[in-house]
Image (cartoon, rainbow, N blue to C red):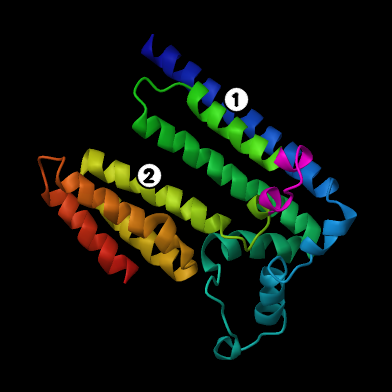
Amino acid sequence: MLNESSKQIQKHRSLYLYFQYIHLFNCIVIIYASIPETRLKDVFSSDALYLPTFYNELIVDHADLNGLKFNGQPNFFLDMLIYFPIYSITHDIVLTGIIYSLIQNCIFILLIFAFSKIIINNFNFYYPTVINLLFVLILLSGFFGTYYSLRWHLICNGYHTSAFILSLTAFYLFVRYMNNNKLHSLILMAVLIFLGVFNDKIFVLGAVFPLLLLSFILLFVKIKKAPVLKLMIIILISAY
């Protein structure tokens, strides 16, 4: 009976992810297909061309890293790891942008799914589905208003979306560690915070400061203060 129930849950989970991916893919393609003529410049803006330009200089032209200048958000982690393999195959900025957006937002769906399971008692698929549908409505908000930039920033590379994903992952690992006090959760969090700060300085505002504040509050709430103190020390060392 338990095996049948587990198989049913796994089946529902697979269907849930499948339909969410299809939904997201359709939304992203629609957004690219409906870019107003006056906003086509966004596809070829300096921010959107940062990764393909960096790829051409580093991989194609074999430029020396010492001669390259990085901005405050070099986008090494997640952005380059996802974008470079796709661009090396397609060599097309628009097509790479669509595939990159799909993968980036699929990662977001998986994070919402994992986060919901760890913080919600009696977890079911309604919670993450509602959250993801709201996220899709944000993506499609440009059709109902004049603020086009918001949805473009959410699907384009170079607009801090990876910092948001890393921040969400940091909060997930934070909750996991507070639940299990396992060393591997602490190590994963330390590595993530180090990469997040190195990757994009806005990660400090999106994750480091909020996590430190949350840890400080937990010192007055939790009976066992040692795990919280360990966490605060790891966050400070990793961010430094």
Of 132 and 83, which appears nearest the observer? 132
Helix, strand, or loop for circle 2? helix
Residue 188 visible in the current orientation? no
The quarter of the image holding the C terminus is bottom left
Q: Which residues are magenta?
A: 141-152
Q: Which residue is mark 1?
A: 15
The quarter holding residue 80 reads: bottom right
Q: Which residue is mark 2?
A: 172
Q: Is residue 90 left or right of residue 76?
A: right
The quarter of the image holding the N terminus is top left
* Location of residue 239 in the rendering, given as x and y in whole percent from the top left corner: 33, 67
Of 27 and 5, which appears nearest the observer? 27
Residue located 16% across and 48% down the image = 219
Looking at the image, residue 72 lies above or below residue 17 = below
Helix, strand, or loop for circle 1? helix
Of 42 and 182, which appears nearest the observer? 42
View extreme (top): residue: 1
Kindly identify the amino acid type of the residue bearing the numbered disc 2. Tyr
View extreme (right): residue: 37
Q: Is residue 125 left or right of residue 89?
A: left
Kindly identify the amino acid type of the residue bearing the numbered disc 1. Leu
